[in-house]
Amino acid sequence: MADTRRFLIQRGLAPLLALALSACDGAQPTPFKAIDITGAGYAQDLNLPDTDGRVRHIADFKGKLTVVFFGFTQCPDVCPTTMLELAAVKKALGADGDRVQGVFVSIDPERDTPEVLKAYVANFSPDFVALRGSLDQTKDIAKRFKVFYAKVPGKTEGSYTMDHTAGSYVFDAQGKVRLFTRYGSGAEALTHDLRLLLKQG
């Protein structure tokens, strides 16, 4: 268990560690498909500029469920799949879809310019918001959300891709972090969880 704990912390996967520990403790299962991290001391706020230069906070979206995902626009699979699924969830929720806010946080500000990010998120939903900080701000927000990311050299000189935590944080309508949903869980599971949170107000 010690080796597993060390690996998860190093990879920025503290939510998975919390799930593993709760399983060991015999904790009662929650009604959610995702990992319930209600009361977590991390992932508290964003404090990053959007593509128009306005600094955004979780409180800006109060009244809505906010789904925060860390990624990069040149990601070939995980990032577009996650964003497509979130757009599908909003549609599946019908009128309640308007009460769901998608937020994409760039981990690659060197290539993800405001113009690139604005166009990228608009491909998935016109109301999705993209945030982009400086290199130092990106490092800080990733630490505060326990998100792992790292450059991986590409096949040609100067090229690279990014390894990163593949999951989303869900905040309730009061702006409190509630869930960590793992990549691959699917749109149906997220729709289920968001419906539960919407019923809770």
Image (cartoon, helix red, strand yellow):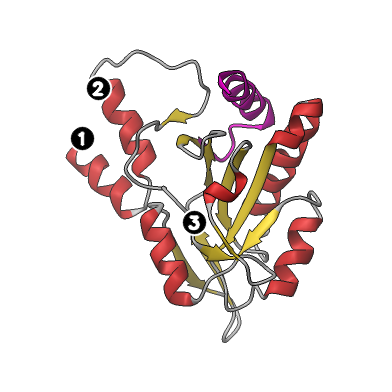
For the residue marked with disc 3, what is the amino acid?
Leu
Disc 3 element: loop
- The answer to which of 54 and 33 lies nearer the viewer is 54
Q: Is residue 81 left or right of residue 144?
A: right
Calculate the distance from the C-alpha at mark 3 to the C-alpha at mark 2.
32 Å
Q: What residue is pinned by disc 2? A: 24
Q: Main secondary structure of the magenta part?
A: helix
Q: Nearer the viewer, mark 1 or mark 3?
A: 3
Q: Nearer the viewer, mark 1 or mark 2?
A: 2
**Total of numbered circles in the picture?**
3
For the residue marked with disc 1, what is the amino acid?
Met
Any magenta on residue 191? yes
Q: Are marks 1 and 2 in contact (CB under 8 Å)?
A: yes
Query: Considering only order in the chain, which callout, 3 or 1, is on the residue closer to the N terminus?
Result: 1
Q: Position of residue 31 (x, y in %)?
A: 49, 15
104 above or below 24? below
Query: Considering only order in the chain, which callout, 2 or 3, is on the residue closer to the N terminus?
Result: 2
Q: Is residue 77 left or right of residue 59?
A: right
Give the residues drawn in magenta, as a range.
181-201
Mark 1 Cα-neighbour bin, 10 Å: few <14, some 14–19, many ≥20: few
Q: What residue is pinned by disc 1? A: 1
For the C terminus, which image quadrant?
A: top right
Q: What residue is pinned by disc 3? A: 46
Disc 1 element: loop
150 above or below 28? below
For the residue marked with disc 2, what is the amino acid?
Cys
- The answer to which of 143 and 201 lies nearer the viewer is 201
